[in-house]
Amino acid sequence: MSPCRFLSLFPLVLLSTFGCGDSSNEAHLAVVSQAEIPDSGGEPASVQLTEAGDRKIVRTAELVWKTEDRGATRQQLQAMIQESGGWIADDTEERLALRIEQTMTARIPVSQFDSFLDGVAASVDFFDVRRMTASDVTEVAMDLTARLNVARQSEGRYLELLKSAQKVSEMLEIEVELNRLRADIEAAETRLNGLQNRIAFSTVQLRFYESVPASVRFGTRLLDNVKIGWRGLIEFLIAVALLWPLLCVAAVVGFVVRYRSKRRANSDAIHSR
């Protein structure tokens, strides 16, 4: 079969192959297992085919509690996160009217997820919020892996066609399809690697707060109100500075109207005499 004829039929093959995304996971596995997949040549494990029965779970947790010493609690959590082999993805401090709140987002290895939560719970009397979720993303991972393997197989066939192509037009058509396939492969690899990262490292949001004493609250609110009043005065002066031409025109018009009214009144008084 000539390269040109095969190239004209190849989009139909791809369309039928990639249409498997709406079928079951077993169908994906059957397509990939029956295809002649070339050697991956040391591809990362994150883009290999997911085996049946190997469930892929994304686990998350959210903990909210009150603490008496926010600084000490933060240092303790930092040490626990480092000890578990995780890292802090976000650390935010927010000062509210009645409390100071600290929010830490940690990424914890899934193997240390339960022990990390137990360690946090051991130092807390009770939680305001304690929420844990487990999302099964096995089908998504299998679908991405199957599509990725089929796309790689198609890329290999296009490369074989490119070697045997003799016309420049054929080469250009094959290059267009190869570029499209490579873009799809890169996008699928990025999404699959991100999914694997979410599976391997659970996301734990830790939100703890410390109440602010009443005396501190009064002083803070007084200072805040003084700042707000000062900012309001500055804004008023800026508005006046922006409107001074209109104010000048209004003053001149008012003076002229008053002057003419006064002259008319004097004239009427003279004529009445």
Image (cartoon, rainbow, N blue to C red):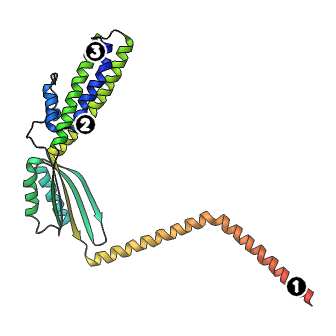
Query: Residue at horizontal 49%, vertical 70%?
Result: 232
* SS at circle 3: helix
How many neighbours does mark 2 have within 10 angstroms: few (below 14), some (14-19), or many (20 or more)? few
Q: Which residue is mark 3?
A: 161
Identify which amino acid the numbered label 1 is placed on. Asp
Q: Which residue is mark 1?
A: 268
Q: Is residue 94 above or below residue 167?
A: below
In percent of width and height, residue 254 lies at 73, 74
Report how far apart the C-alphas of labels 2 and 1 lie in the structure: 91 Å
Query: Residue at horizontal 31%, vertical 11%?
Result: 165
**Is residue 196 visible to the viewer in this orientation of the structure?**
no
Identify which amino acid the numbered label 3 is placed on. Leu
Front residue of 143/205: it is 143
Query: Residue at horizontal 38%, vertical 73%?
Result: 223
How many neighbours does mark 3 have within 10 angstroms: few (below 14), some (14-19), or many (20 or more)? some
Query: How many numbered circles does the render carry?
Result: 3
* SS at circle 2: helix
Q: Which residue is mark 2?
A: 190
Report how far apart the C-alphas of labels 2 and 3 lie in the structure: 27 Å
How many neighbours does mark 1 have within 10 angstroms: few (below 14), some (14-19), or many (20 or more)? few
Front residue of 215/268: it is 268
In percent of width and height, residue 180 lies at 32, 27
Identify which amino acid the numbered label 2 is placed on. Thr
Q: Is residue 100 above or below residue 114?
A: below
Question: Reading the chain from its start, which is encountered first: label 2 or label 3?
Answer: 3
Of tags 2 and 1, the one toward the viewer is 2
Q: Are marks 2 and 1 in contact (CB under 8 Å)?
A: no
Location of the C terminus by quadrant is bottom right
Q: Are marks 1 and 3 in contact (CB under 8 Å)?
A: no
